[in-house]
Amino acid sequence: MSDKADRLAATRSGALDAIRANVRAMRGYVPGEQLNDPGIVKLNTNENPYPPSPRVFEAVRAALTGDKLRKYPQPLGDDFRRAAGRVLNVDPESILIGNGSDDILTILTRAFVPEGGLIASPTPSYVLYRSLAEIQGARFAAVPFADWQPDVTAWPREANLSFVPNPNSPSGTLAGPILLMKLRDAVHPHPLVIDEAYADFADSPGHVGFVNNWDNLIVTRTLSKSYSLAGVRFGFALARPEVVRELVKVKDSYNCDVLSLAAATAAIEDRDYFRGVRAKILATRERMRPALAALGFEVTPSRANFLWCRRGDRPVKPIYEELKRRKILVRYMDYDGYDGLRITVGTDAEVDRLLSELKAIL
Ligand SMILES: *Cc1c(COP(=O)(O)O)cnc(C)c1O
């Protein structure tokens, strides 16, 4: 290298320095551990312990024949939208497809939140919302839950976008429907996004049927959990058709590929399989809670496919670590000192393993 090049290298780091300051300052969202050890019992990222519907495999195989991979997929996912519209009894035009619901949350942030704007969500809840604000160069308000209910009085009404997971993670709790509508009213005309990643486990229809009644309500869903498709990446939003048409301008033209569209369409159409899997998970959840309580955990009653477990002020991180040594992975969550274990509902055999290891540890 010439002297001149050396000098330049010492004073500038090029693209690294050119990254936006808000991105440089972020820690970055840290997803749950995805270990590649096949012997591990994985109860840390709320995946479904059962395989997807057999029809999903048929649909993916069919998509691999002919010249489907050579061509671009449907940009709006028309076949999926028709199928989901039928199943959920909504207008297909009110559905926006996404590469996982995380993609949907990104699209919503880009569409609604200006630089310097404000995103609000309750805390403790899904940590990704803060990262989305940081990427956008927006501010973030974490509004503490009151008894696991959103605090409408403390909520910043000027928030450009409000996210409420319902059921919430890590608690698995549901917000009261009247309270949610009060919140929607309080932030109007800014949107309230109800993140219904776990709504299928809640034994309640959720809010997909209400997006046409309210002009600032948006609902998001995912096929990662209740349809066993976390590896495929497919989620969607429901909003008024005129809002969806604007959001389409923000998304990548082909944000869902041929294979994920085929898998998602087949999965959502197989209602019997879906109900069977859900019933098994709910039955396991209901026996898991008293068993964990008998081991000394305070377990929040959950309407999702996981349980939030604490031991008062006693530390739970060593339990997470010891379980990991014993090849059981749960999620240790720490919200500024308020911490606990979020444990996914697995198969009955997995849950038996968890319980017997916990008995040995405690
Ligand atoms: C899992 C999860 C998502 C994201 O799901 P993907 O569709 O896999 O991106 C969104 N919100 C919450 C609250 C979740 O727990």
Image (cartoon, grey):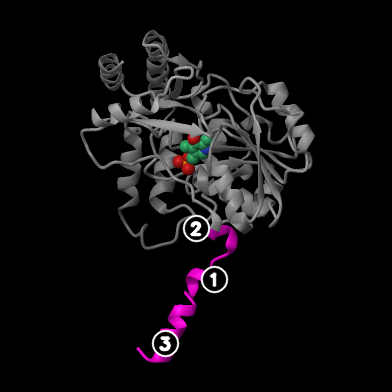
Which sits in the foreground, 262 or 231? 231
SS category of the residue bearing label 2: loop
Q: Which residues are magenta?
A: 1-24
Quadrant including the C terminus: top left
Circle 2 or circle 1, nearest the eye: 1
Decide: is 319 above or below 109. Answer: above
Which sits in the foreground, 45 or 144? 144
Q: Quadrant of residue 187?
A: top right
- Measured in 3D between alpha carbons, the distance from the residue under mark 3 to the one under mark 1, in whole angstroms, is 18 Å
Three-letter amino acid code of the residue under disc 1: Ala
| Residue labelled with disc 3 | 5
Residue in the image at 31% along x and 22% along y: 347
Q: Is residue 24 visible?
A: yes
Residue in the image at 64% along x and 30% along y: 144
Q: Quadrant of residue 236?
A: top right
- Measured in 3D between alpha carbons, the distance from the residue under mark 2 to the one under mark 1, in whole angstroms, is 29 Å
Residue in the image at 39% along x and 42% along y: 263
| Residue labelled with disc 1 | 18
Say left or right for 233 vs 75. left
Q: Position of residue 316 (x, y in %)?
A: 40, 24
